[in-house]
Amino acid sequence: MKKKYCIGLLFSVLFLVSACQKDFLERNPLDQITEEKFYNTAEDARRAVLAVYAPMQAVNWYGKSWMITEIPADNSTTGGNDPDFSPIDNFTINPDNGPNAEFWTEHFRLVTLANQVITKVPPIDMDEDQKKAIIAEASFLRAFAYFDLVRIYGDVPIIQQVPTLASDLQVVRDPVEEVYDFIVADLEKGIADLPPAYTGLDLGRATRGAAQALLAKVYLTMKKFDEAIELSREIIAEGRYRLMDDFAENWLKETTDNNAESIFQVQYAGCGPVGTGNACQAFFAPWGQNITRNSDGWGSQIPTGPSIDNPGTTVKDIYEEEDLRKYHTIMAPNDFYPMINAQDGGYTYPTEGASRSGISIKKYVIGGGPDVCFMTTPQNVHVIRYADVLLTLAEATCRRNGGITVTPDVVEAFNAVRTRAGLEEVGSVTTEMVFEERRKEFAFENQRWFDLLRMDNTIEIMRLHGKNMQEFHRLFPIPSEERAINPKLDQNLGY
């Protein structure tokens, strides 16, 4: 582990060869380039910052991050008794847990690559505006990684430079407050210097809107509600993004990638080298149904339902009959999906169900095809949708105002999400209503655990759901292998 981490820190430019993804990440191989011969031109800078996205695209990040961001919460449970993520589900996780270690490693791998860009690009002789944008892009991505890290682990080391010696890896954990200040500074740089949009081969790279939206969520988490409200309103007023007319358009293969609702997505290209395709379908598609036309589709994460969880608390219980989101979120008995393997007449979910809860996840399940291979589809992963901005505005306003708001533009934003789902408008909004709407809107999108952490009654909710959550379970353990490398990393209480 130490060897891999040091190589990533000292020679991360060699990693760029494995990072080509969709169009904007395609570039010539760099395996014959040494660090001394790199970082000399504007094209070198561009290729280096595109490589920073690679850890996000890896199976161990957005392919499997649901193990950390969804499984502990009340929407999801495990499809079986996997020794890696069953302990996460039942709050018996220990510091040796594999997915937890992978989560830490991939996030700090991105930090390493971002720091390489932030450190090496400034001396390059190139257009100054382009240089600022590239440094801001790396800063945005670093902030994104740290926002996950601080919410999962609490205090984490703030690393701003590329270490040159093994001793440089002996770092202590910095306080949560300092980590958030660091994140805010990086995102402010992004807002100042990132372009408003990209086109052509660069479509999908981080933009100013992505930095604004992420910073609004950071402020919401920090309970800086006025700042979150201001940023959300700025994004809405600019008019660059909009809700897709039909919620389904965010999940249909033909309309989902980089659509009008997308503020930031992880880009995928389907069949190709490891890391170029979205692995979510492999884990979400129900077991034994041959949906993917490959030897995957394991039903590893399944929705909670009253047949195995406390009735009234599960994700199956929360959708009204008229809610259009349910069909595209959860597969229920006898649901017919003409878009899944349309060449074979579509797919009907079994009458008896195909999981131990009797339902399965629909999001990211698109079926087989020429660009679908083992653990790989071309569909992008949603990270920030415009619906998130609208509900961030609603949540921040409610929480600032003591739990309720009738402010016209806030109620309008909230109703836009509801009416798109086929639900009636409301005249006022409460904090509880926002969290309920978020649960339905973003189920299985790596949001629910973080939403629960912002709620005052998290432990009560989880215990109603039948999970024996304790206060210290709000944070995950620092991986034992990281503490073996760096004894200065103290462990979180309870582990």
Image: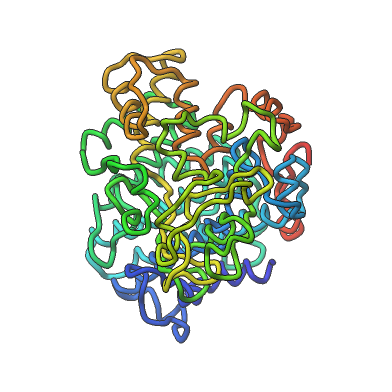
Q: Residue at x 69, y 46 (%)?
A: 356
Q: Looking at this view, is 252 or 164 the one in front?
A: 252
Q: Quadrant of the C terminus?
A: top right
Residue at the location (50% across, 49% down)?
A: 362
In percent of the image, x 51 and y 57: which residue is there? 111
Quarter where residue 388 is shown:
top left
The residue nearer to you, when weighing 16 against 488, is 16
- The image's colouring method is rainbow
In this orientation, does residue 354 appear?
Answer: yes
How far across and down, in percent of the image, does residue 73 sit? 62, 37
Instruction: Give 126 or 425, whichever is nearer the viewer.
Output: 425
| Residue 196 point in image, percent of width and height | 24, 50
Q: Is residue 173 left or right of residue 13?
A: right
Q: Judge by depth and name the residue closer to the eye, 488 or 199.
A: 199
Residue 1, given in percent of the width and then of the height, sits at 69, 67
Q: Count of labels shown?
A: 0
**Which residue, as the protein is rendered here, is positioned at the far bottom?**
32
Q: Quadrant of residue 72?
A: top right
Q: Is residue 159 above or below residue 222?
A: below
Q: Is residue 136 visible?
A: no
In the image, 214: left or right of 470?
left
Please state the horizontal and vertical placement of residue 465, each as a whole percent of the image. 68, 30
